[in-house]
Image (tube, rainbow, N blue to C red):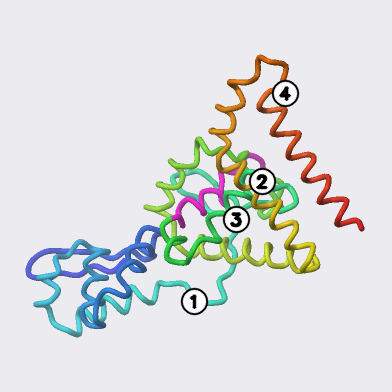
Amino acid sequence: MIEFNLYGKDYEIKEYLSIGDYQKIFKVKDLFEDDYFKAKVVNLLTDCPMETLLEADNHKVDFLATSIFAMVPRQPINLIDRFTIDGIDYGYLPSYKKISFGEFVDLDTLLTKKPEEVIDFLHIITAIMYRPITKTKTKHEFEIEKYDAKTLEERAELFKQKLDIKFTLGGQFFFTQFAKNYSSYIPLSLRQKIRREWMMLKILWENRKLVWIFLSKRGSDGMLSSTELQMEILRNTLKSTRKTLLK
């Protein structure tokens, strides 16, 4: 932690960049000339007024800004599969083979947005990738809490305030690499077909509440229930995709 005093008032800079800190820096990176950008970054992370920073010694502001920039993770970013916050152990997705359809769709949807849009969702992405550890076999072998969108928001806000950005960037990199490696085994023509089917599944998933409401109104006339119908659609789509892959 860096502590400093300007004009009789004390300020401090944490020893790491939280997800929220990283988001703040990214959003102003194109708005200021270099000198003003340094002051603005210090302002955002310490609440030290801009007026005070602009009147302070140049070398002091430069040192503070440089210290902040030094905390931004550099490539390559290594995956750290577990950490502890407020006494709770969190673990990274243990196996991509066991990832649920819902969490894969949600991660894929968020990570394929434009870079400037992905930044706004970094804490949510991290809350999907890292969840409370429920069972530990070894340090790097564990099970995590089942994916539940209901508990996502609270965990995401906690991570935004208290979690080092290095966990997010490492986890994001590994998930993206997994998606690339997975798609590289599929021929281009087949990949395009699967992509169309995948997009339909994503649309169904992302609008699941509306689909459920619509179908539940028609459940009394002998049709399949909404859950059964959605499962049937999913089974048939996955079945046809699997047959094509086997060919």
Mark before the other along the chain sequence, 2 or 3? 3
Label 3 sits on a secondary structure element that is helix
Residue on which disc 2 sits: 201
Label 1 sits on a secondary structure element that is loop
Q: Nearer the viewer, residue 189 or 27?
A: 189
Mark 1 vs mark 3: in front: 3
Residue on which disc 1 sits: 74
Q: Amino acid at mark 4?
A: Leu
Mark 3 neighbour density, 10 Å: few (under 14) some (14–19) many (20 or more): some
What secondary structure is the magenta-colored segment mainly? helix
**Mark 1 and mark 3: Cα distance apart in space:** 24 Å
Label 2 sits on a secondary structure element that is helix
Q: Is residue 139 above or below residue 62?
A: above
Q: Is residue 89 within the magenta segment?
A: no
Q: Amino acid at mark 2?
A: Leu
**Mark 4 and mark 1: Cα distance apart in space:** 52 Å
Mark 2 neighbour density, 10 Å: few (under 14) some (14–19) many (20 or more): some
Q: Residue at x 68, y 52 (%)?
A: 198
Mark 4 neighbour density, 10 Å: few (under 14) some (14–19) many (20 or more): some
**Mark 2 and mark 3: Cα distance apart in space:** 12 Å
Q: Residue at x 27, y 64 (%)?
A: 45
Q: Amino acid at mark 3?
A: Asp
Q: Amino acid at mark 1?
A: Arg
Mark 2 vs mark 3: in front: 2
Q: Quadrant of residue 177?
A: bottom right
